[in-house]
Image: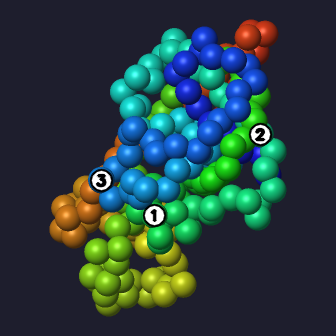
Amino acid sequence: MQVYHVSLDTEGDMYKLFEPRIPWAMSEEEDAYTPRICVSTNIVGAVSGVGYDAAFEVGTSIMVYSADVQERFLERPDELLAYHGVMDAMYTQEHWVTWPLMMHGSIYQIESFERDNYLLPEPRVERKVREYLSARYDTYRESLTLHELLNHFIRRVGIDEEDFAEMFDIRGIRVFTRLALKAADGSTVILRSG
């Protein structure tokens, strides 16, 4: 499986051996004990998952590292959400690598981007959200994950996202949904989340 890691350090080596560590930028719920290399299965997710998104502007240069990793050696997004408190893992498709990993980097410049709100699927709200939606919508399905309910289902049935978040005290974050990146050869790559 191809995985990506994004850095603002464009002066670094094009080939780099990453060592698992505790990230300096993470949410307060996130596991602060497991050393890891945070990667995503897509570049948009890797950029969204960086944590210091204020640094990303049009014209910003980024280093996009990539590697091919066997899926069995990755901690999956559903595991990160359930056991490590990574609330945006289902959106960013964040995976963890817990051993040293050699990655190859390429430099890109951000030409444009689009962002959107993402409601964090915090377990503390799941019961109330499910009770509310199941009582009011015939299209509600128990098989939908909290991530799917908060970020797809409520939009489909026309619920105002801000009102819903306020009603259940759900935190939201800004995530990237589209990136246009200019490569060193001058070509432009347009990427979308998911």
Mark identifier at residue 52: none
Q: In which quarter of the image is residue 153?
A: bottom left
Is tag 1's residue or tag 3's residue first in the polypeptide sequence? 3
Q: Is residue 108 above or below residue 22?
A: above
Mark identifier at residue 67: 2
| Mark 3 residue element | loop
Label 2 neighbourhood size at 10 Å, few (<14), some (14-19), many (20+)? Answer: some
Q: Position of residue 90 (x, y in %)?
A: 53, 60
Question: Residue type at mark 3?
Answer: Glu
Q: In this view, does 68 lie above or below 33?
A: above
Question: 14 left or right of 160?
Answer: right
Q: Where is residue 11 in the image (x, y as percent from the top left)?
A: 60, 11
Q: Do the residues labelled 2 and 3 touch (CB within 8 Å)?
A: no
Q: Distance between the residues labelled 2 and 1?
A: 23 Å
Q: In this view, does 37 lie above or below 126?
A: above
Q: Which residue is drawn at 53% across and 35% down?
A: 47
| Mark 2 residue element | strand
Q: Mark 1 points at which residue?
A: 84
Q: Name the residue under label 3.
A: 28
Q: Position of residue 95 (x, y in %)?
A: 61, 54
Total numbered labels: 3
Question: 65 left or right of 91?
Answer: right
Question: Residue type at mark 2?
Answer: Ala
Question: Residue type at mark 1?
Answer: His
* Depth order, front residue of 146/76: 76
Q: How far apart are marks 1 and 3 (CA)?
A: 11 Å
Query: Colour mode?
Result: rainbow
* Depth order, front residue of 87/155: 87
Label 3 neighbourhood size at 10 Å, few (<14), some (14-19), many (20+)? Answer: few
